[in-house]
Amino acid sequence: MNIKQLYKQISQLQENVELTIEGWIISNRGNDKIRFITINDGSTIANMQLVIKGDLASKKEISEIAVGSAVSVIGKLHLTPEAMQPFELSVSKFLYINNPQEDFPIQKKETSLDFLREIPQLRHRTSLFRAIMLIRNSLMFEIHKYFQSKGFLNLSSPIITSNDGEGAGETLLVDDESKDYFFKQKAFLGVTGQLHAESYAEGFKKVYTFGPTFRAENSHTSRHLAEFWMMEPEVAFCDLKGIIEITDDMLKNVIANTLKNCPEEMKYLDSLQNNKLIESLNNFINKKLTIIEYKDVVENLKNYVDKFEEKDIFFGMDLASEHEKFLAENIVKGPVAVINYPKDIKAFYMYQNDDGKTVAAFDLLVPGIGELVGGSQRENRYQKLVDRINELKITQETLQWYLDLRRFGYAPSSGFGLGFERLVMYVTGTSNIRDVIPFPRVAGSIKM
Amino acid sequence: MNIKQLYKQISQLQENVELTIEGWIISNRGNDKIRFITINDGSTIANMQLVIKGDLASKKEISEIAVGSAVSVIGKLHLTPEAMQPFELSVSKFLYINNPQEDFPIQKKETSLDFLREIPQLRHRTSLFRAIMLIRNSLMFEIHKYFQSKGFLNLSSPIITSNDGEGAGETLLVDDESKDYFFKQKAFLGVTGQLHAESYAEGFKKVYTFGPTFRAENSHTSRHLAEFWMMEPEVAFCDLKGIIEITDDMLKNVIANTLKNCPEEMKYLDSLQNNKLIESLNNFINKKLTIIEYKDVVENLKNYVDKFEEKDIFFGMDLASEHEKFLAENIVKGPVAVINYPKDIKAFYMYQNDDGKTVAAFDLLVPGIGELVGGSQRENRYQKLVDRINELKITQETLQWYLDLRRFGYAPSSGFGLGFERLVMYVTGTSNIRDVIPFPRVAGSIKM
């Protein structure tokens, strides 16, 4: 029985049930007669109070239990419905006590996020990171649950690839010590699993990947990592409209269930955001998704030129993060899907619309984050795709297997990519992406 | 509604319900009056029969629908409880037909596994690979479900690391194009997430990783890949006995549920294995796990020296795959956990037993595969661990963060690693590991 389960079964708890609690100490106060020790067992950010009386309270080893100590304890449950915490443990025996050394870096006093980023192996032993990682876990599992319940097949797309995906962004290279082409050719860390997912969608119809993805990203921003997790569904017999519906329904489900799964954690994070976090998530869940044409977005943004650093706004531009955020936060005031982008700012494989100028792409933008999801209907016409590749001077040879999917019984297909850390940032209200992944990897630094 | 759902709801299906089925064509036979087309939609290996009569049957485009064609069709459900397949679709209209070109490599005739390995982007459009990948998907999700239901936190352990884990096996290196140390130091693709998982177990108590892992493995065997998926749980306040119980319970659950989730696929694979596959899996599920001391295994194997290529059997040897398989298949006749291995053949972080010779490690061996799982109780005594590292001449500096976990409120911890592809091989009865992962990566080859 862990603390989370106690909270979940709170109406059925019985006085005086004997329990073993194992966890790490948050605080220790009291005197020789009575001692109150707070313990957390990692199942929730909610702690449990241990109450120690009599002979046990007077023992030196009990008074010396320190913050961060690993402790196992037996006692009897005492219900305290009137108190702040609805139950506590009357301790009969300590089974295990292991105090940290004096240089344990996480003490009771406040510690900065910058400092905690230096100790990723320990920072989850604070309420903030405990909450973020519990929510990350819930989001991960809810994504699997959603797709599995809808009949999607999970696909392990390869990490090491011979092509660099969209040709966008820098790629990282892989080789063995001898640097003599272990794979007999240049090998990259994948920037997307989409091409491989598409091949599986042609046969399984609905598939998704969920795994790490890499960029040799040199910018030191709060929004970029060299290693991050991506979730990429791909659906055959599905067009742009269909895939936007799936995106919206999936996100609403996953977020709503996480609010239910992690009430203590969400309440805590909400309190750090002036109680605006849960409100904005509920706004997402309950509101119909707004869909706007890219060309209308451009016209609209022109009215707010004085709000932007990048003031040159025209059809054909790539929207900057400031534009995306402004659109979501100030114009739509909620999540918005922008569709039909100019083809020159999007990837080669997107379906070319009849206007000759745009592709059937969409980006889902949310307040506070900007782009959360990017997706498209794929170009299903072999010759159009080949022509586009040649136009962009992309090497056809390494992509021939992908192009050939169109020749071997192809159903029109659509898909999207969700940067998982972006979703965790959005749901937890975290502003720096390095705080939502256990061991962040950025240029120039791989701690641990 | 997909074909899998029709099978699941078979007792409630109603005659003449209108359905849209989307999928890929398996066969097409008939004449101008009546035509039988078999379609698969990827939800199960079970196909559905489309029956076309009247004018529609006489149309050229219908008679020309080829194997592998992507098709979308509307029709009425017709229940056929007496027939081989319990239902079929009386087609009223074809919404989409896209025939493959003549060089589509998967035709009705038998194709060899070797040939199919050359086209990983298409081979899932055979019954065999469809079945394997559906079961792989079930095993993946059941693993998540099991751990989540037991209160484990999923941890994204980093892929790019500064240390090479156990120092065992060759590692792959990562850098950007300029090869100028993108991460300001040598960077490796992780061979294990265990060290990072251990840091999270100290705080969350029960955690697991599930992600890709890498080896610069040069051996071209049927058991090794350069890129494979590992699942590594780590549990604080848990000893060797406890972690073996978790391993056994997890595997029994995951396999039993997959037998339930994928009845058609298991039946098909069973038929390829002389109907021995399901029997052996049920044997695993229903039998209490045998636990044997390594030293007793050695004594036992000495009685069968003439059965082995490696005849030198002695305390201190690393068991070869032939020994492991013989133990599981011929001596125990089922899964077996071998415990307390000599410390010199095991990793530095394993708990040193009082005998001074062995460590609290275990390997779970299964018939047909050999080692499926390897795990241990971790050495929790700081000085013992430091001494062992120095004895083995492992650089202490890069591991100091890991060693220090022992100094900062450490609870004894145990964990294991499951090579996910090994599990898929075991459950599907597949003998070559390249056939249980969508796009296998081995030395000298990265197709697609």
Image (cartoon, coloured by chain):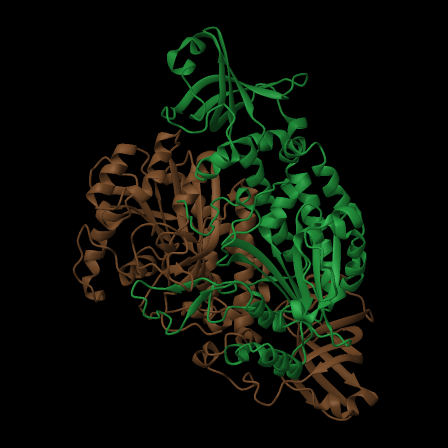
Chain colours: A brown, B green
Is B45 placed above or below B193 here?
above
Query: Image quarter for residue A148?
Result: top right
The residue positioned farthest toward the top in the image shown: B33
Is A124 placed above or below A183 here?
below
**Residue in the image at 70% along x and 53% along y:** B324
Viewed as shown, does residue A409 lie left or right of A297? Answer: right
The number of numbered discs placed on residues in the rendered structure image is 0
Q: Which quarter of the rendering shows the N terminus of chain A?
A: bottom right
Viewed as shown, does residue A392 lie left or right of B343? Answer: left
Report whether residue A264 is seen. Answer: yes
Position of residue B74 measured from the top left corner of the image (x, y, whole percent): 47, 22
**Residue in the image at 31% along x and 59% along y:** A170
Viewed as shown, does residue B429 lie left or right of B55? Answer: right
Position of residue A17 measured from the top left corner of the image (x, y, whole percent): 82, 69
Is B187 placed above or below B124 here?
below
Position of residue B91 measured from the top left corner of the image (x, y, whole percent): 49, 17
Is B426 placed above or below B37 here?
below
| Viewer-nearest residue: B99 or A436 | B99
| Viewer-nearest residue: A306 or A350 | A350
Position of residue A7 measured from the top left corner of the image (x, y, whole percent): 68, 65
**Residue in the image at 52% along x and 42% along y:** A152
Viewed as shown, does residue B66 lie left or right of A311? Answer: right
Query: Image quarter for residue A324?
Result: bottom left
Query: Image quarter for residue B88?
Result: top right
Report whether residue A68 is seen. Answer: no
